[in-house]
Structure formats: C-alpha cells, structure tokens
Image (tube, helix red, strand yellow):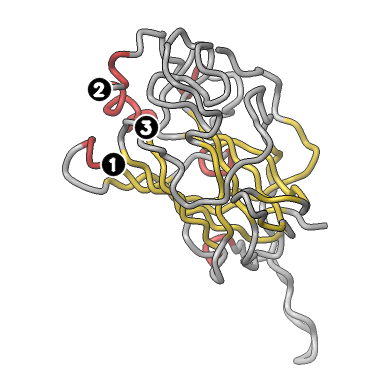
Amino acid sequence: MTDTSEPVIGRRTVLIATGATAATLAVAAAATEAPSAAAAEPAAVCTLTKEMTEGPYYLDGALVRSDITQSKPGVPLKLALTVVNSACAVIPGALVEIWHCDALGEYSGYVGNNGHNESDDGAFLRGGVLTNSSGVANITTIYPGWYRGRCIHIHVKVHTGVTPTSDGSFTGGTELHTGQLFLAEAVTTKVAAISPYSTNTVTRTTLSQDSVYDGGGAASGLLTLTALGSSTSSGYTGTLTLGVDQS
C-alpha cells in the first residue's frame, strides 16, 4: 500500500500551530507609533502554510462520531484539534474528519494492500466530529501503524455547514482544508516496539525520509503528544490547532 507522493499543494492555504486555544496563534504585528488615540490597532498577522495531499484512501460517507476505533487494537490516541479562521477566531460547528491505517498498516475499505488478512467493514478508523463552542474537535482513536513508502500519519479534512444524516453520516457543506497530521519520531519508535505494531514486518519510513512531511514541525501538521500514563501502552493525547482560510 503506497500513498501518493505528490508535493504539498496549494488549493487553499491553512494555518497550523500547536496549542488548544486560538490565543496561542496570534503573532504580534509590527506597528509604528499611532498618530492619535483614534487610530486603528494593527491586525494580527498569522503564518499560512499550504495543504497536504489527500492521498488515495479517502472514502465518502464517514460517520459523525467521536470514537472511531471500532475495537481495533493499538495504543490509545486522544486528539484535541482546534479549528480557527485566518483571523485566529475559533470556528464552532466545523466538522473535523480524519482517517488513517490500523496498527498493521491497513486502511478500511482497502484491507490487504499492506499484506495482512483481516475483516474489512470499510469504516474502521474513519469518522469525524463537530467542533464545540471553543472550536475543539475531540476524537478518540489509536496510534496509526505504517505501510510501505510513508511515515506514520493521519489524514484530516475540515468542513463547515454540513448537515448530519439519519444514517449517522453527513452531507453538504464546504470543504475548507485537506491535510495530514504527523507524530513525533521519538514516540513512534516506542510505539513500534510493542504489539501489535511490532508484528508489522514492513520497513518503516521515518519522518525525515517521508515524501510528504517537509520537516516544518507544527506548521506542517506535527502533533504535540503528551503521555496519558507511565507506559507507552497507556497512550497519548495529540493536540494541534488548524487555522483555515474561509475566504
């Protein structure tokens, strides 16, 4: 199973930074001495970065749900993704959708592409949730595995104006961002050493070897990982703020 290795694309621009609140995104704009008390304050200036490729394994009809694990074994990963606009204001009610492979490198809907035989319902480790009043999407999943040619990563889309459907999915809306989330190599090395990840015999591509991740840290989708316990198997939280251009 090999993801597309297209370069970063610029269909839209997106601000990505670590942190749980929009306040951490603000970069003070340089300003000259105001000529009078009535002069307008300078606007905050936010750093923009380009989107990442969607890759070949996206499926329409993802379920709107906060837990996408479906009993898949692996190290727990609790994501807290904050969505803000280019003015650094939070966006409540945005759908943050993610999808990624399981511990053995298999995507639902495409099982077998990484050489493993397992049941495939076309839905595991796929789904999304609406951001709350603070612009935060909380999603429970597992630490992804890997497949040939790509480092460990999570795909993400941000939609606004979606309508939930009776079957638990969604329809309509506007897609504001398509990107990828990445995980620190130091943590990945620990995760890869425990079961079931350790049974994956495919050679693992590191962050520095990846064809999509550009080494830009949080500005390129690198999550901030915090341990949930004293052991690797206890899991991690992963936080990031995605700032999307609504224009």
Q: Are marks 3 and 1 in contact (CB under 8 Å)?
A: no
| Amino acid type, callout 1 | Gly
User: Separation of disc 2 and disc 3 at Cα?
Assistant: 12 Å
From the top left corner, tell me how far across and down residue 122 is, in percent: 55, 29
User: Separation of disc 1 and disc 2 at Cα?
Assistant: 13 Å
**Of 246 and 73, which appears nearest the observer?**
73
| Amino acid type, callout 3 | Lys
* Mark 2 / mark 3, whichever is N-terminal: 3
Mark 2 element type: loop
User: Separation of disc 3 and disc 1 at Cα?
Assistant: 14 Å
Which quarter of the picture shows residue 27?
bottom right
Which quarter of the picture shows residue 89?
bottom right
**Residue picked out by circle 2:** 195
Q: Residues within 10 Å of mark 2 (few under 14, many from 20)?
A: some
Mark 1 element type: loop
Q: Are marks 2 and 3 in contact (CB under 8 Å)?
A: no
**Residue picked out by circle 1:** 235
